[in-house]
Image (cartoon, rainbow, N blue to C red):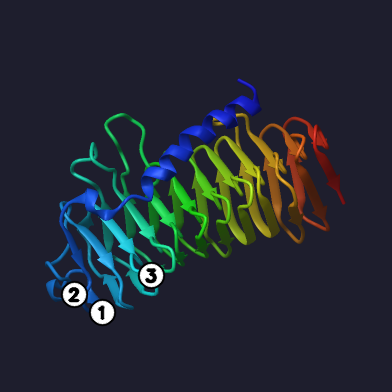
Amino acid sequence: MDRRSRFSTFSSIVALSAAIVGGAADSFGQATNAVATGNWSDPLTWSAGEPNGTTSAIVNGGFAVTVDQAGEATNLLDLGTIAGETGNVTIAAGADLTVSNVNPANFPSTIRVGQLAGSTGNVTMTGGTVAINGAAPSGFAIADLLVGDNGTGTWTQSGGTVTAADEIFVGLGGTSNGTLSVSGGTVNVAGRNLLIAFFNGAQGTLNLSGTGTINVDELLFSSFDPGAISTINQTGGTLNVGAALVHGRQGNATYNHSAGSATVTTALGNGDFVVGDNGPNNFYNISGTATATAGRNLLVGVFGAAQGTVNQSGGTVSVGGVLRVGIDGVGTWN
């Protein structure tokens, strides 16, 4: 399958995923709402007691809930389901949270940070572990972590490990603004893909710095649909992608890379690093001590509507196959 047909097929599948993910929390059965700022393990923090694997957890009202110990569980975590309200969650060192739906045939498990348009959700992770299984019996799971579902969402991680069994979206809906910041610890996209700014109007930002590590099993897409706006700021850390990195699929995308490594391998795909797949105003700015490695090709300005630009003032770019600047689209290397 060529690149065009492959990504087109993926587009139809993931669009279906995204549409389903935006559904109401009612699909998850009984919910317990935060009614105070406090620890996750304290029943008084919640309207219906401490969440568990058969209940969903919802945080609004400006409340801040701290996952404070090991063994915590829920089948859904929503932060910001009411316009104008904010929900906050902290994952503390030594704590762990498992998000797993006991009946995934109805709806797979997920965390939605800034779920409703006009709402805000914030997650701060200083340590511990978060595991989101996302599995469905069909073998086709729905996004495990949405940072900025339809509202404003931030996930700020300085330690610990989060593992999503399927996908992570940063800025999904047309009213969304999502920011994923990783300065320490590890984010594992263990099933499929990391998508930054998905639908038209979505805004997504990925900040990678320090000792942070992001591992993506298959594809990393930025600015998936026309009108989506994404920014990647990498000042350190490690980004590993197992199939292809497609920067600027159809929207506007900027990748500022001054330190740390970005590596695309052929483990599960073609190993291409793409700047400007089929969208306008796509920039990859590499400087300083940054290193970028494409397992196969580095392609700039691929399809007819693409405008891809690489601005290199430092750093190192390594290509296992060929470097092509301007294929059917407009490509520039400065």
Q: Which residue is located at x 37 percent, y 65 percent?
A: 127
Disc 2 marks which residue? 45
Q: Residue furthest right?
A: 334
Secondary structure of the residue carrying numbered label 2: helix
Above or below 175: residue 29: above
Q: Earlier in the sequence, mark 1 or mark 2?
A: 1
Residue 190 in view: no
- Quadrant in the picture for the N terminus: top right
- For marks 2 and 3 on the same chain, the one whose residue lies earlier in the sequence: 2
Q: Residue at x 75, y 35 (%)?
A: 302
In the rendered image, the vertical position of residue 92 relative to residue 52, given as above or below = below
Q: Which residue is mark 1?
A: 37
Q: Could you tell me if the residues under marks 1 and 3 are in contact, i.e. CB atoms within 8 Å?
A: no
Classed neighbour count for the residue bearing mark 1: other residues with Cα under 10 Å, few (<14), some (14–19), many (≥20): some
SS for callout 3: loop
Is disc 1 in contact with disc 2, using a CB cutoff of under 8 Å? yes
Q: Amino acid at mark 2?
A: Thr
Residue 40 position, x and y percent, is 22, 69
Which amino acid, mark 3? Ala
| Residue type, label 1 | Thr
Residue nearer the viewer, 8 or 24: 24
- Residue drawn at 34 percent across, 55 percent down: 111
Please name whichever residue, 235 or 116, is drawn nearer the observer in this view of the structure: 116
